[in-house]
């Protein structure tokens, strides 16, 4: 159930790749991501590239190539585009096309704030998925997600809509943060069968055992994401080895928590 986030920041790369980035940033980003994917694939079921890290470096072409590599080398891994898109009409149609056709996403993260019609273009791709932002891991999520509506918090209304209205073709999941295990439990109560994409362990300090206890269902039902703790486990020549070791440990910790 481990998902490895691909957040390539050249300032955090190992020394050799930092040097490469000084004159060929795109090559350095590509080598780093390929190295992380190779190292962690045996221990993960999914990769989650964050589009902002690629776009800010003009590395969209790199992301396209990585998507093709994932399809070719790791066909059983889920490729999740973390884009948090949220718009309506023809704009949403183009964002969906970008995610699914250009970047070959199996699923994409989306923001439900603009309502059902902003999700419809993604749901039109019936063989692909969406992960709807529900209870996010950042402290500022409280500003709106905890507002009361119909006697429950707004994030719970998102969970209800996802489970009861949007999931007609079994293609909807929810993003809930590991930093809020009680809220994960509440979401699981109303969205019993939906997969949960759970960021917030590792560098963000989420409680893995509490997260698994709160979020698992009979099928497992979770993709637990770790990014920085794995991909930047070492800044030395052993960066791939260390990434693999932390990924394996995280996988083992998830499995142990599930079994307990």
Image (cartoon, rainbow, N blue to C red):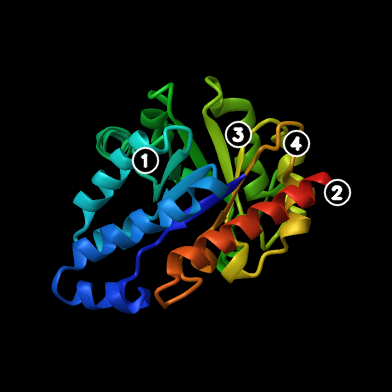
Q: CA distance from mark 1 to mark 4?
A: 27 Å
Residue 206, given in percent of the width and then of the height, sits at: 67, 64
Q: Residues within 10 Å of mark 4 (few under 14, many from 20)?
A: some
Q: Mark 3 or 1, which is nearer the eye?
A: 1
Residue ID at (45%, 71%)? 238
User: Upstream in the sequence, badge 4 or badge 3?
Assistant: 3
Which residue is tagged 2? 260
Q: Residues within 10 Å of mark 2 (few under 14, many from 20)?
A: few
Which residue is tagged 3? 161
Q: Mark 2 or 3, which is nearer the eye?
A: 2
- The reply to whether dot 1 and dot 4 touch (C-beta < 8 Å) is no
Residue 242, given in percent of the width and then of the height, sits at: 52, 67
Which residue is tagged 1? 70
In the rendered image, the quadrant that contains the N terminus is top right
Q: Is residue 106 above or below residue 27?
A: above
- The reply to whether dot 2 and dot 1 touch (C-beta < 8 Å) is no
Q: Residues within 10 Å of mark 1 (few under 14, many from 20)?
A: many
Q: CA distance from mark 3 to mark 1?
A: 32 Å
User: Upstream in the sequence, badge 3 or badge 1?
Assistant: 1
Q: Is residue 23 above or below residue 105?
A: below
Q: CA distance from mark 4 to mark 3?
A: 19 Å
Residue ID at (47%, 74%)? 234
Which residue is tagged 4? 217
Res 216 quadrant in image:
top right
Give SS at disc 1.
Answer: helix
Q: CA distance from mark 2 to mark 4?
A: 13 Å
Q: Is residue 27 above or below residue 162?
A: below
User: Upstream in the sequence, badge 2 or badge 1?
Assistant: 1
Q: Say which of 22 and 108 sits in front.
A: 22
Q: Is residue 100 left or right of residue 25?
A: right
């Amino acid at each position: 159930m481990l998902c490895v986030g691909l957040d390539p920041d050249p300032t955090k790369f190992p020394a050799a790749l930092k040097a490469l980035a000084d004159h060929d940033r795109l090559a350095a980003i590509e080598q780093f991501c390929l190295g992380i994917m190779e190292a962690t694939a045996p221990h993960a079921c999914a990769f989650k590239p964050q589009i902002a890290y690629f776009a800010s470096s003009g590395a969209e072409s790199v992301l396209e190539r990585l998507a093709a590599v994932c399809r070719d080398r790791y066909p059983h891994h889920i490729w999740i585009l973390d884009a948090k898109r949220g718009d309506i009409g023809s704009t949403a149609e183009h964002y969906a096309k970008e995610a699914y056709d250009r970047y070959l996403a199996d699923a994409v993260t989306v923001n439900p704030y603009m309502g059902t019609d902003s999700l419809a273009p993604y749901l039109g791709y019936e063989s692909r998925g969406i992960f709807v932002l529900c209870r996010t891991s950042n402290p500022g999520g409280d500003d709106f997600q905890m507002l009361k509506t119909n006697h429950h918090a707004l994030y719970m209304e998102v969970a209800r809509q996802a489970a009861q209205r949007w999931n007609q073709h079994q293609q909807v999941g929810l993003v809930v943060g590991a930093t809020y295990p009680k809220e994960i439990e509440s979401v699981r109560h109303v969205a019993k069968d939906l997969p949960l994409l759970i960021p917030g362990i590792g560098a963000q300090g989420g409680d893995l055992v509490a997260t698994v206890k709160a979020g698992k269902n009979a099928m497992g039902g979770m993709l637990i994401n770790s990014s920085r703790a794995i991909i930047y486990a070492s800044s030395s020549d052993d960066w791939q080895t260390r990434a693999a070791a932390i990924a394996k440990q995280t996988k083992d910790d998830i499995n142990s928590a599930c079994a307990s």
